[in-house]
Image (spheres, coloured by chain):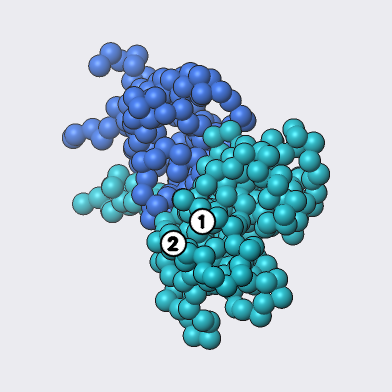
Chain colours: A cyan, B blue
Amino acid sequence: MRPPWHSTTFRVLTLGAISLLVAVLAHRVAAPSRRLAWRSTLAPSPAPANPPGLPERRDQPLPSPSSPEAPPQGTKPAAPAPRAKPTPTPAPAQPAPTPAPITEISSQEAWQAFLAGRPFLDARRSGEFTEGHLPGAWNTPVWEADLDDRLLDFKAQRRPGAGDAIVIYCSGGDCRDSHLLAEKLLAQGYFHLLVYRAGYPDWVAQGHPVEKGGR
Amino acid sequence: MSRWLLHPRLTLLFRLILGVTFVLAALPKLADPPSLAKAIWAYQLVPALVLNPMALVLPWLELVCGLALLAGIWVRAAALWVGALLLAFSLALAVNLAQHRPIDCGCFGAAGPRTEVERLTDMRRDLLRDLGLLLLVAQVLAATAPRKP
C-alpha cells in the first residue's frame, strides 16, 4: 500500500494548506498600508445598536463645531432618514434636503464645498494620498485594513452630524472607491454624502491647491 | 497520444514556463493584497465574504505551485492547482468579456490607466494566454498521469 503522501489528493490539499498557512503568517507581518483585512469592509455591516454612553441620533440639526456631542457611531443603519421639515424656529443654516443620500457633484460644486469648509475624505490608497491630496482631506483608503480606525478617527476629531455634507473623492475616471466608501458611511447612518466623481486628477487639472504627505 | 507530445523534455519546458509565469504573477500581488482585492472585486463575480480571503491566499497559492513546478516537486499536484486557477481565471475573463465589462485583469498586479477599448483588447489577449497555458497544463498532467501496473 502506498503511503498517503504519494497520493495526488494529499499533495493537492497540502499545497493548499501550505499556501493558507503562509498567507496567515504574511498577513501578520504586512505593513499597515499593504494590509488587507480578512473580512471585507465592502459588505454593508450593520451599524452598532447604539453603544452605551452615546446618544441615539436619527435626525438632528447640524451641530456646531464646538458641540460636545459624541460622534455618530450609534446612528440607525442605512435607511436614508428624511429630514424634518423646517420648523418655525430660526434655522437659516439648514441646507435644502438632498433627494438622494449619495449624490455625485461637479468640479465646481467640489470647489464650493472646499471653500465652505466641508470635510473631504480621500478613498484612494494611502500611497497615493501621500503623493498628493486635497488640503485638509482625511486619508481613508477604502481597500486598506485600517479603514475603520481611520473613519473612527475622522468622526472623533471632526464630529460630523448624520446630515452634514461629507465629500468623498478618489482617482476619477472609472474609480469606484469613493462610491464604496459612501455606501459604507451610508450604512453607518450618514445621509448627505457627496461624491466628487472627477476626483483628484480633476482637482489638480483645475489648478486648485494640493497638499503632500501622509497622516 | 503521439510519443513526442509526452516527451519528458517537452514536459520540463512546459512546467518551467508555467512555473516562471506563476511566480512572476504572484510577486506583485503578494506585495500589495489590497490592489488584488480591488481587481477581484471589479470582476463582480466573487461574494464580499470570500473576496478578501481570496486576495490574501491566492497569490501564495500561485507562488507555492509555481515554485513546485520549477523545482519539479509534486508536479502533478501543482499542475492540478495551476490548471484549476487558469480555468477559473479564463471563466472570469470570459464572463466579463461576454458582458462587455472592461476590467483590469489583475493577473500580474495593478495596471496603469487605459481606455475601455484597450481594456477589452487586453482581456481578449489575457484570455487567449490563459487558454494557451491550460494546454501546457494538460500536457504536464498527461505526462505525469499515474501508470497502471
User: How many neighbours does mark 1 have within 10 angstroms: few (below 14), some (14-19), or many (20 or more)?
Assistant: some
User: Do the residues bearing badges 2 and 1 touch, measured as CB atoms within 8 Å?
Assistant: yes
Q: On the rendered structure, is A182 left or right of A137?
A: left
Q: In terms of image quadrants, where is residue B3?
A: top left
Q: Which amino acid type corresponds to the residue marked 2 in the rendered image?
A: Pro
Q: Quadrant of the C terminus of chain A?
A: bottom right
- Which residue is rendered at x = 46% and y = 50% of the image? A100
Q: Position of residue A24 (x, y in %)?
A: 50, 60
Residue highlighted by disc 1: A97
Q: Residue furthest front?
A: A88
Chain for disc number 1: A
- Which residue is rendered at x = 71% and y = 44% of the image? A111
Of residue A162 and residue B8, the one placed in the foreground of this image is A162
Relative to B24, residue A120 above or below: below
User: How many neighbours does mark 2 have within 10 angstroms: few (below 14), some (14-19), or many (20 or more)?
Assistant: some
Q: Position of residue A158 (x, y in %)?
A: 67, 67
Residue A82 numbered mark, or none: 2
Q: Can you see residue A204?
A: yes
Badge 2 and badge 1 in a common chain: yes
Q: Residue furthest left?
A: B149
Asked which secondary structure carries label 1, the reply is loop
Q: Which amino acid type corresponds to the residue marked 1 in the rendered image?
A: Pro
Q: On the rendered structure, is A116 left or right of B136?
A: right
Q: Closer to the N terminus: mark 2 or mark 1?
A: 2
